[in-house]
Amino acid sequence: MSATPAHPSTTTPEMDKAERALIDESTRIPVLLFFGSAVFWLLVGTLFALLASFKMNAPHFLDQWGWLTFGRVRPAHLNAVAYGWAAPAGIGVALWLMARLCRTPLRHSKLLICAALFWNIGILLGIFGILSGDGRSIEWLEFPNYASLMLFVAFGLIAVWAVIMFRFRQPGHVYVSQWYLLAAFLWFPWLYSTANILLNFEPIQGGAQGAVNWWYGHNALGLWFTPIGLAAAYYFIPKVIGRPIHSYYLSILGFWSLALFYSWNGMHHLIGGPFPAWMVSASVVASVMMFIPVITTAINHHMTVRGNFGALKWSPTLRFTVFGAMCYTLSSVQGSLMAIPSLNKVTHFTHYTVGHAHLGLYAFFTMIMFGSMYYITPRIVGWEWPSARLIRWHFWLVAIGIGVMVVALTIGGILQGIALLDPGITFMATLDYTKPWLLLRSGSGILLTAGHIVFAVSFTLLLLKAGSKRTEPTLFGSDQGRKPESLVP
Amino acid sequence: MNKMPVIIIGAFLTFLSSWIGLVAYPYLQLGRYTPFTAEDTGDINPPPLSGMAVMGQRAYASSGCIYCHSQQVRQAGYGSDLERGWGARPTVARDYMRENPAFLGTMRTGPDLTNIGARQPSAMWHHQHLYQPTVVSPGSIMPSYRYLYRLQKIEGQRSANAIDLLPPDNPPDGYEVVPTYEAEALVAYLLSLNRNYPLPEAPEPPQQ
Amino acid sequence: MNAIVYILLAAGLVFFGGSTLAAFYWAAKTGQFRNLEDGSKSIFDHDEPVGTATDAFADKTGDRPLRRGAIALNS
């Protein structure tokens, strides 16, 4: 009953290469649809982010229209980047990984094209709905019903596709990334449908909504974005370096312990709130237990890269992915600590939480998505990235941008939190502690915006085939005098 | 290695338990409160919302007030909510039984609004504040919600619901600022926010 | 309407819970949890074997990007 080896010794390198090229090519249209729309929504979401951030510095900025009031621009930002950028980018990466890991050309691409269509219509309707005043003000579930229904249909199609793909895979081992992806594809429709039914379609009583809201909100991060990000990291880090993951046993253990502890975490967003103490305590305990999967993953990634850190100098994919993997550890440890009531007391209700969210969804997830897209896109279009310089600019702009943002929000948030705890400090004075840091946050937002524009330009140029025909990867160190013969040892 | 099935079943059961604990349990228990009628006074708590206030709830959601204002007073030991005078007692699940959605909030760029109706019982204060926050709250970084108000020419008598404004925020001579229906609804909702009533599970503490 | 919510929730539970359990059962039965260290090599093939950098980069001494990068293997 033991799994058969993935690549029987009867195949030759040429056969393997041809098979891989065929599989990569078969994913082209659906993956590019998801990537393309993701890049578009990234730009839209970034614009909303900038607007929201500026409004914190200058409250009167563009306040004459209801469409652009802070309370709408901010959820428009969250939904555009979470559901418009991060999720489709993740889906694109997941589709490609599924095809590669199942070692079978992508089937039923029409299902996926339909899903991409539904998805984008859903996002468009949802953002439009929020801006026009149909937003629900339930964090992470602001989309009005007509939009979330579209997303659910798209999700259903993708989940069905994933199961079909898995059925038709080549015999062999199921790699850890596939575990993460399949689990994410099954968990998310469950989470999304349950939460939407209970909060938006047939809303339950208000007293119970908070628990369901944060069960969903936290699990959307932990059981959807995190598994996809980790699936990509578990594939690209060993694949780019050419060295198997340090301890495969730990990676499997990490998967199951993530499934085990993450689902209980959500209530740590409501510590001290109107809920039975045991619910909150259970969440605090589960949040602290998250140290287990996080530390196993961190050790594993570190040991895999160890001895090859020099590779970060060359490989864009590796640099973005390792940056993301490190921030996964950082944001998870931070999250576990934030759940401890004595620390939560300071950070709750402050900008610190916003910084934490960006550390998780941006510095971890988005950076890994960038890295994955740098690997995948050339392989599916058969064309190289046009310029290493653009990739380098992209990396440094967003890495510095997100670094400054997280530091600014963390310091500002702690100062705000300490001030809020002291009833001797007037509420208005608590704001003064945050103002300079919010200004710095806007500055970091400009860096991120510039980085995203560079990325979008680079992506568009690639699609327009402005680079060179794909022979060798575009590397950080290779933009000047890049001659094909110099690349061959 | 043969411990794996145990881990597997454990993972499934835990995910299931979170579903039961954080979804099914709240739905069955926290989601089925009935209002409490006080025997001595006959007060129904939490009090029913007026139709205007229900419309105002919708305006609160559509304007995204939740992104800066919470509506929960935490117990003593979890921050200075009580000391800041945001409520006479911590809020409990039943307080939210008439809320849809429940605006618990996770951010305090602005103060908590659990009992704003008790703290600021004047409708005019709220209209002035929404129209131009710094009029009544100097130093505030709340944006103006003047898109909820109309500037109109005074036809004969000044409208009864026109907002009192001082320079530099006042309208030009012969004009007045009146709230739209949405603004009236939002203010009705804000005025309804008063959760200082006693409940069996949350008695009102003695007044100092 | 309450009944609909119940049915939807119960159906979700049975469907997603059932498929999770089925997946677990299948994985254990087909030996996905055996020979784990071999499993880690399943992402490599004969064209891109272990020891081949696929987003090629320089070896540790030179600064010349190599197609088949020199890799420091686990020592």
Image (cartoon, helix red, strand yellow):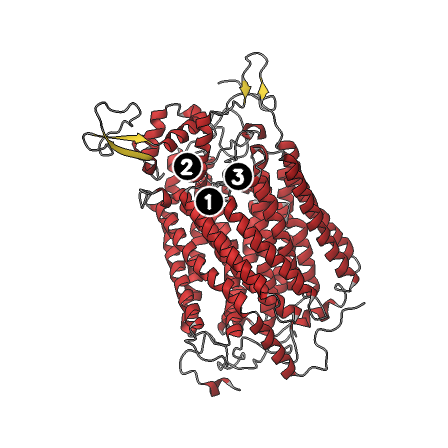
- Give the image quarter of residue A108: bottom right
Q: Secondary structure at mark 3?
A: helix
Q: Secondary structure at mark 2?
A: loop
Q: Chain of mark 1?
A: A
A365 in relation to A278, above or below: below
Q: In this view of the protein, can residue A227 be seen by the observer?
A: no
* Front: mark 3 or 2: 2
* Residue at mark 3 shares a chain with residue at mark 2: no
Q: Residue at x 61, y 62 (%)?
A: A231
C25 in relation to A412, above or below: below
Amino acid on which disc 2 is placed = Gly
In the picture, measured across the screen, residue A251 lies left or right of residue A360, that is: right
Amino acid on which disc 3 is placed = Lys
Which residue is at the front of the view, A295 or C29? Answer: C29
Q: Secondary structure at mark 1?
A: helix
Amino acid on which disc 1 is placed = Ile
Q: In this view of the protein, can residue B44 be seen by the observer?
A: yes
Q: Chain of mark 2?
A: B
Q: Earlier in the sequence, mark 3 or mark 1?
A: 3
- The residue wearing badge 2 is B110
- The residue wearing badge 1 is A414
- Give the image quarter of residue A413: top left
In the picture, measured across the screen, residue C60 lies left or right of residue A9, that is: left
- The residue wearing badge 3 is A345
Q: Residue at x 72, y 81 (%)?
A: A9
Q: Where is residue B29 shown, x and y percent of the image?
A: 65, 32
Distance between the alpha carbons at the discs numbered 3 and 2: 17 Å
Which residue is at the front of the view, A26 or B123? Answer: A26
